[in-house]
Image (cartoon, rainbow, N blue to C red):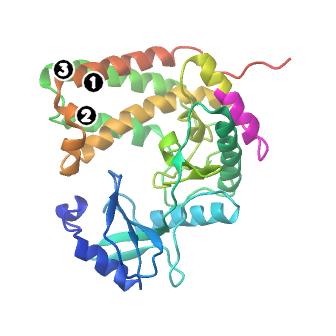
């Protein structure tokens, strides 16, 4: 793989059209780029006016075995009547290769925005999360990783230490806040839970609404605790989050029990995502799409705010975790 392939500089329209033609797909419309930083995703119509989405995976992120595990999980979920965008199969395959790029085809499924303050919608999402996890408990991924401190905290810490993006005058204070966050998470992170296959990135932007939820983008699917697919759906103050959590879990438990001991992992998981997300942007900084999309990474005020955010998360971690309302 070349650096230009990693940055998609060699993924030209003709390359995409040739890749699709090899699979018997003739494009009748233009290729419409869809919003995706990590991969390259395009919508199009074929000669029979059927609408598709093609996804070209960023080289060197996931290998073929890891992507195929994601696809298999999606197909299992689809077979278990979970509404989601699953890859299409051509001659028994869902993953294809062209000029070093791995790609997959999906049906184009539209929908409106999931309403994060709508408890009725949240209840339906909770019900389907229960079904997703019922399938996910069947076995763990063998090739995809498990959420943990090494990937989400320690590797990013090494990247922060080496990067030139953090202003030198602010770097020591920033690294001190990172170290404090790592220490607090490490003290609270244990492996005393049953890992399962997760959606992995179940935030409101990855849920569409079509008379019910439609889950999209299993690209970050991995093993981990069930609460990982729940905490990103919570918003507002503690009282609001408690109500939302109770709504989700009550519906979730129609399909399987939820271990409420996992609630203590919500803030550690939030901290891990904060650190991981920042490191993800840094790792992609040489991709020309990233500096223009995240210009604040070059501003001193951003790093001051980020230091303050990490310090605040340390304080939150020291508070009692979110709990459900006791039932008497």
- Residue drawn 20% across and 23% down? 171
Secondary structure of the residue carrying numbered label 2: helix
Q: What is the magenta range?
A: 244-259
Residue 41, compared with residue 281, is above or below; it is below
The percent position of residue 63, horizontal first and vertical second, equals 39, 64
Q: CA distance from mark 3 to mark 2?
A: 12 Å
Residue 160 has which mark?
2
- The front one of 84 and 109 is 109
Q: Is residue 256 magenta?
A: yes
Secondary structure of the residue carrying numbered label 1: helix
- Residue 17 location, quadrant: bottom left
**Which residue in the structure is indicated by mark 3?**
170
Q: CA distance from mark 3 to mark 1?
A: 9 Å
Q: Are marks 1 and 2 in contact (CB under 8 Å)?
A: yes
The total of numbered circles placed on residues is: 3
- Choose mark 3 or mark 1, whichever is in front: 3
Secondary structure of the residue carrying numbered label 3: helix
Residue 316 left/right relative to 174: right
Residue 175 has which mark?
1
Task: Report if residue 316 is visible in the image.
Answer: yes
Q: Residues within 10 Å of mark 3 (few under 14, many from 20)?
A: some
Q: Residues within 10 Å of mark 1 (few under 14, many from 20)?
A: some
Residue 327 left/right relative to 100: right
- The front one of 243 and 146 is 243
Q: Is residue 161 magenta?
A: no
């Amino acid at each position: 793989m070349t650096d230009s392939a990693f940055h998609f500089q060699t993924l030209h329209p003709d390359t995409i059209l040739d890749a699709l033609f090899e699979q018997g797909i003739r494009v009748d419309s233009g290729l419409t780029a869809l919003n995706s930083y990590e991969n390259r995703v395009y919508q199009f119509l074929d000669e029979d006016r059927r609408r598709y989405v093609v996804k070209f995976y960023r080289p060197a992120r996931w290998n073929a075995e890891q992507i195929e595990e994601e696809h298999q999980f999606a197909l299992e979920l689809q077979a278990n009547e979970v509404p989601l965008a699953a890859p299409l199969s051509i001659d028994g395959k869902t993953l294809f290769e062209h000029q070093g790029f791995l790609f997959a085809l999906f049906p184009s499924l539209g929908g409106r925005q999931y309403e994060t303050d709508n408890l009725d919608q949240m209840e339906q999402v909770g019900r389907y999360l229960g079904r997703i996890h019922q399938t996910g408990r069947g076995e763990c991924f063998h090739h995809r990783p498990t959420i943990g401190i090494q990937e989400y905290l320690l590797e990013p810490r090494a990247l922060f230490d080496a990067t030139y993006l953090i202003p030198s005058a602010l770097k020591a204070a920033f690294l001190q806040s990172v170290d404090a966050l790592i220490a607090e998470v490490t003290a609270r992170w244990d492996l005393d839970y049953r890992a399962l296959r997760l959606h992995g990135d179940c935030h409101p932007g990855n849920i569409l609404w079509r008379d019910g939820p439609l889950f999209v983008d299993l690209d970050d699917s991995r093993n981990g605790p069930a609460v990982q697919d729940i905490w990103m759906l919570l918003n507002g103050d503690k009282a609001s989050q408690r109500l939302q959590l109770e709504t989700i879990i009550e519906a979730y438990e129609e399909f399987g029990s939820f271990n409420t001991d996992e609630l203590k992992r919500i803030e550690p998981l939030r901290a891990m995502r904060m650190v991981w997300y920042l490191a993800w942007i840094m790792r992609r900084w040489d991709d020309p799409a990233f500096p223009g999309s995240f210009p604040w990474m070059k501003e001193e005020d951003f790093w001051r705010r980020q230091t303050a955010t990490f310090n605040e998360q340390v304080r939150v971690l020291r508070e009692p975790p979110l709990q459900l309302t006791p039932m008497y």
